[in-house]
Image (tube, rainbow, N blue to C red):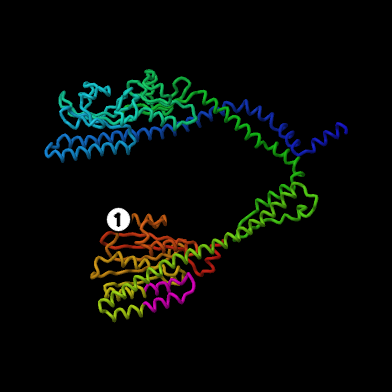
Amino acid sequence: MSMRQRLRQMLGSFIIRLIISSLLCSVIPVIIVGFVGYGTALNIAKDRILESVSVSHSQLRQNLDSIFGKMENVCDSTENYLYVLMNKPLEPLSEYLDYFTNARQSITILTDIFDLYNTCVFLPANMFVSNEGLTFFSIPDLKKYKINRELLTGIGISSQWLYREDLQFPIIIARDLNPVNALLCFRAYCVGTEIKYALFSCILTDTIGDQFRNFFSGVPITNYLVNQEGIIVAHTDPSMEGGSFPEKKLKTITFSNKAAIYLGANPIFADQFDNGLYLISEIPYSYLTEQALRLLRFTVIILVIMVPFTIYITFMVSKTLTKKLKILSGSVKSLQLFDNTITVKDIAHYFNLNSPYKDEFDSLAEAYTNMITVIQKNIDNILSLTLREERLRYQVLQSQINPHFLYNILGSIHTCYSLGEKDTADQMINALTRFYRLLLRKDRDLIPLKEELEIAGLYLQIESLCRKGVLTWEMNYEDGIEHFKIGKFTLQPILENSLLHGFVNPREKMHITVDCRYGEDTVIIIISDDGIGIDPSYLALLQENLKNRHPHDFDRHIGLYNVNARISNPLYGSGNITIESKAGKGTKVIIEFKQILTEDEHEECFNS
């Protein structure tokens, strides 16, 4: 084979042609872009990094501000407890000790809730509770925490924020004997030179360092927390804690009003908290240049892909080789799921599906058409099973309500017979007979709203007979709305709930109103009563259970929860139930579901 023939054979490969055309059209532009774009990329990288660090710095500041606020809050609450404790008489001693125990527990709970390390209270040595040893200490114990009396007498009513190294807390608090570095929010109350009490809440500087490392994980950003004396309270590197921050840099930060400050080549972000501490985030210049190179490489890749000449040459060389691939790709793009049927362009006449000499594209097309056929069969099976499952679920829920309702009504009839009210019991039996005749003659799950209102009216009539006329009601509905479909036996459980839980006492009257109105493509049914209402705390539980459909008191409201489960089913309107109530004024139950004209039409919509 001659050299020319070998060359033509090599160039006949799609991959070789694509590589050669890409190299010719991309190497030179990439080189030019590399030189021209470096400066632009560096500026873009700086802006993006500064913006990203600024956002993270602000979030970190908010987190630390929240921690400092919690420490202040714990000190405020502790001072309140101390004020009462200091002024509470010792006699009777049991009451004094009870208050002391409650105060100590409350301080400990607050410390744990706010995730602080500890809260310490220092009282005069002559108070016997000062020897508690975990939270309460005597004033002379202040020296163990490196706090001198000069600081106490000049502190005033404000908090003093102190950084202390190598503090030793009680073993129960510290869990080991290793000393710790801590940031204290310190307060004291003095009368002249006499110290009445002192206290502090504290957090470990390791905890603040963890905040630094979590916010800038994987990024070489250095964070400092510095006090006004220039001492590093917390640092990304724990070994730097207790060191000194350069005084000149601290002055520059103090008097600068810019968002980003350059200290040498490194940009920094700095904020001062209300307690005087500075939060500083420093970005190494090497990180900016590294990101600029990454951005430059990314820009070059994008330019290589987007160069029109490269696309044109690649297209011209490969279009004859990719005809079948384009047809198959277009067929995949046209793939749609509509009305539970997969539609796709006919590709059979472009490929040799039945030929024994199929190439790779023919085999791919054959596998593709087989896959579409299998998917269509699976969709049909899934939809059939889903519809069957929803119907069975509805029937199970319905079967739970009917016996529950019948049990309650038969109980009312038995009560009437026991009280000698035979006429009333007979009327209830007649009404119950008409009620079930109307209910059972319907063999479908969805019935017109008008018929559901008739069922509800018969139920209210039965209850009115049982309650000797103290129950009154009215039903209102807008024109035409009575033709829309609703799940059978939806309203009766709601009405039963109103009667069971709404009466103040059996002798007082109660009025129920049922309003049916139009929503936006929905039907809204509002059942309101003027009963005793629902306690706000229990109302919140009911609303949460209805929203999540995971009731915790199912036995108490079986009818309500079952109706909620049924009405939320897509086959019966994808609806929901909400409850509004005011104690002593009444309750309002709002049912809203999609408008359904016929069950067949709704099933067709559900399938789509």
Give the residue pinned by disc 1.
Answer: 536
Report crowding for label 1: few under 14, some 14 to 19, many 20 or more residues within 10 A (C-alpha): few
Nearer the observer, 260 or 184:
184
Residue 196 vs 505, above or below: the answer is above
Q: Can residue 274 be seen in this snapshot? A: no
Residue ID at (32%, 80%)? 427
Q: Is residue 434 magenta?
A: yes
Using residue 329 as the reference point, say whether residue 191 is left or right of it.
left
Image spot of residue 497 (x, y percent): 34, 65
Determine the image quadrant of residue 295. top right
Q: Main secondary structure of the magenta part?
A: helix
Q: Quadrant of residue 471?
A: bottom left
Relative image position of residue 498 (x, y in whole percent): 32, 66
Q: Quadrant of the C terminus?
A: bottom right
Quarter in which the N terminus is drawn: top right
Residue 378 seen in the figure = yes
User: What's drawn in magenta, residue-wise?
Assistant: 432-457
For label 1, the SS is: helix
Given residues 588 and 289, the one toward you in this image is 588
